[in-house]
Image (spheres, rainbow, N blue to C red):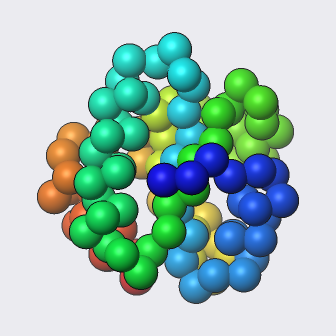
Amino acid sequence: MQEWSQLEIEEAVNGQKTALIYLYTPMCGTCQMAGKMLTVTEQLLPDQKIGKADLNYMPQLAEQWGVESVPCLLIFKEGNLQEKLYAFRSVPYLLDRIRSIY
């Protein structure tokens, strides 16, 4: 999972059929665990890129998309926010939620 800039996030949301953006903060223990689950999920979905962004440096994203807490996975389809996941639960759960949006 690569760290995305504001521009890369905007390009992904507007230019891809499905875009996944993981929002976190570095000092959040739950975010560390969620990030590991997403790394495994990304390997199981080789055609789907997942970008990540430290919300400390992009607070406007939280405001723009109504993010209430971290960790948060934003799932976009054709430029529209489809789902915000806060409870990551497990890799199979993440795969199921992501695949349901395709």
Q: Is residue 1 left or right of residue 95?
A: right
**Quadrant of residue 78 in the image?**
bottom right
Q: How many marks?
A: 0
Residue at 62% in and 47% down: 3
The answer to whether one can see residue 90 in this image is: yes
Q: Is residue 28 left or right of residue 79?
A: left
Residue at 77% in and 30% down: 57
Residue 41 in the image, given as x and y percentages of width and height: 29, 59
Residue 48 in the image, given as x and y percentages of width and height: 44, 74
Q: Is residue 87 left or right of residue 63?
A: left
Residue 11 in the image, given as x and y percentages of width and height: 77, 71
Question: From what the image shows, is residue 25 above or below residue 79?
Answer: above
Question: From what the image shows, is residue 99 above or below residue 29?
Answer: below
Locate the C terminus by quadrant. bottom left
Question: From what the image shows, is residue 84 above or below residue 78?
Answer: above
The answer to whether one can see residue 84 in this image is: no
**Quadrant of residue 24 in the image?**
top right
Residue 21 in the image, given as x and y percentages of width and height: 56, 55
Residue at 46% in and 34% down: 71
Q: Is residue 81 left or right of residue 15?
A: left
Residue at 65% in and 34% down: 54
Question: From what the image shows, is residue 61 above or below residue 44?
Answer: above
